Image (cartoon, rainbow, N blue to C red):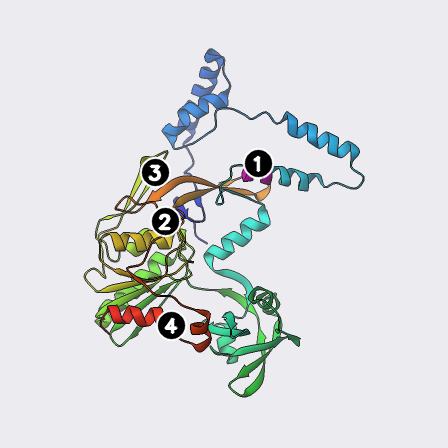
Amino acid sequence: MARKLRVRKVGSDEKAVKKPLSGNLLFIIVGAIVIASFFAGTRSNQIVALVGPIFGLRVAADDVDLSSVQATYKALKGNFDGSLDDKALVEGANRGLVSAANDAYTLFMNAKEVSEFDNDLSGTIGGGIGAEISMRSGNITIIRVLKDNPAQVAGLAAGDTVLSVNDQTTTGLSVEQAVALIRGEAGTTVKLSIKRGTETKEFNVTRAIVTNPSVTSAINDGIGTLTITRFDSETGTLAKAAAKEFKNAGVKSVILDLRGNGGGYVDAAQDVAGLWLDGKVVVTERRQGDVAETVKAGNNALLAGLPTVVLVNGSSASASEIVAGALQDYKVAKLVGEKTFGKGSVQKLISLPEGAQLKVTVARWYTPNGNNITTEGITPDVLVALTQADLDAGNDPQLVAAKKELNL
């Protein structure tokens, strides 16, 4: 996944990739630190903590006394009746240190978890068939197939019930367990027994590397529907392309579907909100209550003036809430659905040894009207529930309500 110079991810992370310093500048900085350390009689890391903010660095001035951790390790190593994995012990200590911050979004991730996290955000799921499944009436059911992916090529379709995977029944399995069976190494084959209507069919599907685009769009009856499942590095470009298609087709109104979207990059949210907001503030970030950054939309609001409804639910979080909150605050769109998740903080990723990363809360974000929605979420203008009975019946009362708001 392409990385920008400085990318903020809300609800997930922020990764700062810094430009290399020139040789002369680096020499001057190092020299200044050494000289200051010598004359001040202090440690260089304290000096770095003082001058770091000038260069955009945030560095702790003091080390923590970890002698008690060493004492615990020696006592454990010297007395435990069994084998100990030193690497696992160190990782456990790191996790414990970070978890003591008592923040649900500040996490230690090892190299494997970092890879899984990146793949989840980019939509790369490894070997799979390119189908989205869910539980319908107690059955594992395909609810969407991705264009030009193995499931579509093999002939699978939305509404198909998955009876078994490689002759293992799906009865009693959770969605996650069924997904684990269906996924596998690219190039291998998975056998699915499918019930379609009254017929039972078997499909042999060759797995492939599947990338699920974050944006899909459709135009029906003069309405453009823009569905965004996450805010990744491609979201802004894909959403802008869809907006251009809407304009060229002369759509009369727009539905932005952010249901189930757990967040992503701040600048992707900025790009999407900018389709309606021309140069306006999208979100502000505050540290210790003070405004640290103000994020504004660009000046190419392709969808400005078009009647718009934003669909949200309890899984719409962080970057989704930034977009929904901004459009609601400026009254350029109505929100329909259920109260959002309530994730009003900003995280960034910091690289650690051996491929690990620290995901740490660095700021709180506020809507243009100055609201931080942590724990409370955003309340839609029109509250409409979507029940399991609706899903089982293939009904979408939230979408119906959105069209009603647009007088369709």
Q: Which residue is mark 3?
A: 286
Relative to residue 274, is residue 85 drawn left or right? right
Mark found first going from the N terminus, 1 or 4: 1
Identified at 44% across, 77% down, the residue is: 393
Q: Amino acid at mark 2?
A: Val
Residue 210's x, y, as percent?
51, 65
Which image quadrant: the C terminus? bottom left
Q: Amino acid at mark 1?
A: Leu
Q: Which residue is mark 1?
A: 97
Q: Residue 266's mark?
A: 2
Residue 16: quarter of image: top left
Relative to residue 12, is residue 288 drawn left or right? left
Relative to residue 87, is residue 103 drawn left or right? left
Q: Secondary structure at mark 4?
A: loop
Q: Amino acid at mark 4?
A: Asp
* Residue range of the region highlighted in magenta in the rendering: 95-99
Would you say residue 30 is visible in this rendering? no
Mark found first going from the N terminus, 3 or 4: 3
Mark 4 or 2: the one toward you: 4
Residue 229's x, y, as percent?
41, 61
Residue 335: quarter of image: bottom left
Say above or below: 309 vs 34.
below
